[in-house]
Amino acid sequence: MNEILTLQNIIIYLAVMNLLGFLSMFIDKKKAEKGSWRTPEKTLLTIGLLGGSIGSIIGMYVFHHKTKKLRFSVGLPVILILQIVTVCYLKYLGWI
């Protein structure tokens, strides 16, 4: 298990997920402007939950997208705090 949960692997995973979160906010904003099919909110929140919360939060404010929705303006920061606590706990256990 220690070979998988290395700090390097976690950083790579989080970088990819945060890029995905940022791009998903951009893509959904553009779709909203065009009036075309939108990315479900559940999908956007799931990306944040799976590690893309920082990118999603940045994308939300850069593109002014979902900023008035409470589940995003409060939900994504709460998810981020839980992720930080989880990483600190895993580090405390010596798993990373």
Image: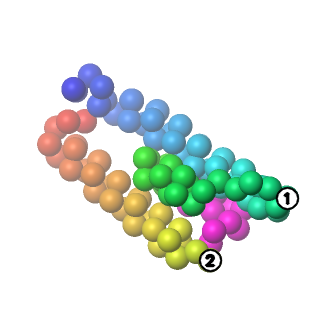
Q: Quadrant of residue 96?
A: top left
Q: Main secondary structure of the magenta part?
A: helix
**Image quarter of residue 20:** top right
Residue 58 at least partly seen = no
Earlier sequence position, callout 2 versus callout 1: 1
**Image: 34 above or below 91:** below
Where residue 62 appears, as percent x and y from the top left, is 69, 62
> Quick one: label 1, few (<14), some, or many (20+) residues within 10 Å?
few
Residue at x 28% of width, y 56% of height: 85
Residue 41: say if magenta: no
- SS type, badge 1: helix
What's the residue type where badge 2 is placed?
Lys
Residue at 40%, 66% in the rendered image: 78
| Residue 81 at x, y percent in the picture | 36, 62
Is residue 64 among the parts visible in the rendering? yes
Residue located at (66% from left, 47% from top):
23
Kindly check if marks 2 and 1 are in contact, taking CB atoms under 8 A apart as contact. Answer: no
What is the C-alpha distance between the residues marked 2 and 1?
Answer: 20 Å
The spot of residue 1 in percent (x, y) is 21, 26
Q: Nearer the viewer, residue 44 or 53?
A: 44
Q: Which residues are magenta?
A: 55-67
**Which numbered dot is residue 34?**
1
User: Which three-letter amino acid code belongs to the residue tagged 1?
Assistant: Lys
- Looking at the rendered structure, the number of numbered marks drawn on it comes to 2
Among all residues in the image, which is located at the extreme front? 37
Residue wearing tag 2:
68
In the image as oriented, which residue stretches furthest toward the top? 3
Q: Secondary structure at mark 2?
A: loop
Answer left or right for 5 relative to 60: left
Q: Tell me if residue 78 comes above or below residue 14 in the rendering.
A: below
Report crowding for label 2: few under 14, some 14 to 19, many 20 or more residues within 10 A (C-alpha): few
